[in-house]
Amino acid sequence: MIKIYHNPRCSKSRNGLEIVKESGKDYEIRSYLKDIPSKEELKNLLALLNIKAEDLIRKNESIWKDNYKGKDLTETQLIEAMIKFPKLIERPIVINGKKAVIGRPPEKISEIL
């Protein structure tokens, strides 16, 4: 089953969800702002995406600029920041089996469906 980490207030995330729906495959929506991923879940996501924690963070968010920008943070500290402020997590993220992609641009989602 496909899983999408979704923020309904984000146009890219809404576009990504439409691509998932149009695939006709079964999917699950994870509203990650309300149902915040655990540390282990974020580590697994990073492994599936094959990226570092810093690459999953939205650096234009004021939360990042006000609290973290310019600091030398470890992977663990970055993951903890995403748990504390899930708005920092890049979106949408789509998982299909052992493949995952950040849907920016949303068309990248089609690569794993």
Image (spheres, rainbow, N blue to C red):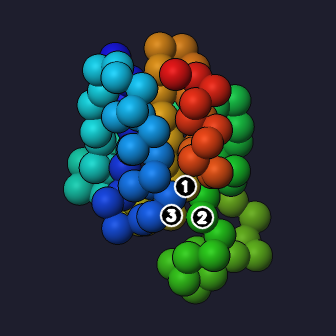
Q: In this view, does 61 lie to the left or right of 29?
A: right
Residue for badge 2: 58
Q: Which residue corresponds to the image point at 69% horizontal and 59% vertical from the top-left?
A: 73
Q: Which residue corresponds to the image point at 46% horizontal and 52% vertical from the top-left?
A: 15
Callout 1: SS: loop
Mark 1 or mark 2, earlier in chain: 2
67 or 1, nearer to the observer: 1
Alpha carbon separation for disc pair 2 and 3? 5 Å
Residue for badge 1: 90
Circle number at residue 55: none
Label 2 near label 1: C-beta < 8 Å? yes
Tell me which amino acid carries mark 3: Leu
Is 76 above or below relative to 99?
A: below
96 or 76, nearer to the observer: 96
Tell me where residue 64 appears, x and y as whole percent: 58, 74
Alpha carbon separation for disc pair 1 and 2? 5 Å
Residue 89 seen anywhere in this rendered image of the structure: no
Crowd tier of the residue under label 3, counting other residues whose Cα lies within 10 Å: few below 14, some 14–19, many 20 or above: many
Tell me which amino acid carries mark 2: Arg
Circle number at residue 88: 3
Crowd tier of the residue under label 1, counting other residues whose Cα lies within 10 Å: few below 14, some 14–19, many 20 or above: many
Quadrant in the picture for residue 58? bottom right
Callout 3: SS: helix
Label 3 near label 2: C-beta < 8 Å? yes
